[in-house]
Image (cartoon, helix red, strand yellow):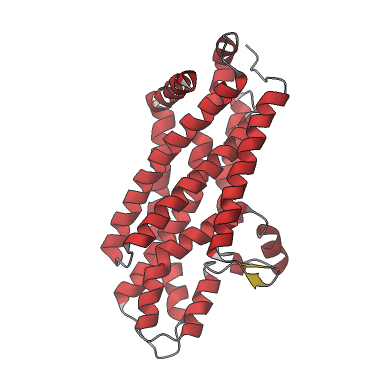
Amino acid sequence: MKTLFILTKRDAKLFFKDKGMFLSSLITPVILLILYISFLSKIYRESFVSALPTGFTVSESIIDGAVAGQLASSILAVCCVTIAFCSNLLMIQDKVTGSVRDLTVTPVKRSVLAMSYFAASAAATLIVCLVTCGLCFLYIASQGWFLNGTDIALILLDVFLLTLFGTALSSCLHYFLTTQGQMSAVGTLVSACYGFICGAYMPMSNFSEGLQKVLGFLPGTYATSLLHNHWMRGALDAMEESGVPAQVIDGIRDGVDINIYFADKMVSEGTMYAVLVGAVVVITLAYMLINVLCKPRYGDR
């Protein structure tokens, strides 16, 4: 346990010491927030307004709160995974520089070394994502605050679980990478594609029925739905209290992927958590088995 702590501390220090890696991880959510506000907030607002019955008006603060909640949840749904891929690059850098050879010639077990990379990456990702979460809270406060204590606690739980999911997924993929080129290719691919397949950039309801069924098997879909639910629930409840019919609210929930359907049945929140936690456990175990059973992969040096 002491060895695991020492190695985790070493990995975390190297991540925060690398200004380029750390700043790129920290700046990415800020850039996404600015881009979302600049280009997507108007689209989200129009979708909410168009969903209201003809001649029915809702307070601007409620609409603004719902839009801000959708923006914040979409950003975190992407960042918790993509930042994990960035913070976990130390695993590959150690192979490129040959540092991993120095570590493996010591009595340190390969499983302990593997978990140190995992723990350090998870800790670094969580710190960056919590900072991002704080920025999102400030943005929502400026637009329309409808969150309560339960929502905030569930949002933090969602961020924690999605961070573990992203760390486990990146750890499995990074194990097989040994060069800077491979590292850049995978990072670019994940950054470009993950936001679409998890429903963060565009709601799944806009996809074809066949694609929706495929995405229903992916844990990231349910993580995004949980974030949408907890960030937007207060604003949608306020919208319903202002007189918007329940059927319209249900339609909005369907349209922004708060309600997810699998085999034509709505997936409960508890089931979504079960899928996400199960994915974290399974992928983490797979990562450990890979390190135990597979031959170590090093860089060219």
The residue under the point 48% across, 40% down is: 83
Q: Quadrant of the C terminus?
A: top right
* Residue 293 appears anywhere in the view: yes
Tell me where residue 196 appears, x and y as whole percent: 58, 55
Where residue 62 sits, quadrant-wise, is bottom left
Tell me where residue 218 appears, x and y as whole percent: 64, 54
* Residue ranking furthest to the front: 1
Of residue 243 and residue 83, the one placed in the foreground of this image is 243
In this rendering, the answer to whether 283 lies above or below 22 is below
Where residue 289 sits, quadrant-wise, is top right
The tally of labels here is: 0
Tell me where residue 300 appears, x and y as whole percent: 65, 14
* Residue 200 appears anywhere in the view: no
The residue under the point 41% across, 66% down is: 232
In this rendering, the answer to whether 212 lies above or below 219 is below
Tell me where residue 184 appears, x and y as whole percent: 58, 32
Judge left or right: residue 264 versus residue 38.
right
Judge left or right: residue 137 versus residue 236.
left
The residue under the point 64% across, 27% down is: 177
* Residue ranking furthest to the left: 142
Of residue 43 and residue 80, the one placed in the foreground of this image is 80
Judge left or right: residue 44 versus residue 283.
left
* Residue ranking furthest to the bottom: 55
Of residue 158 and residue 228, the one placed in the foreground of this image is 158
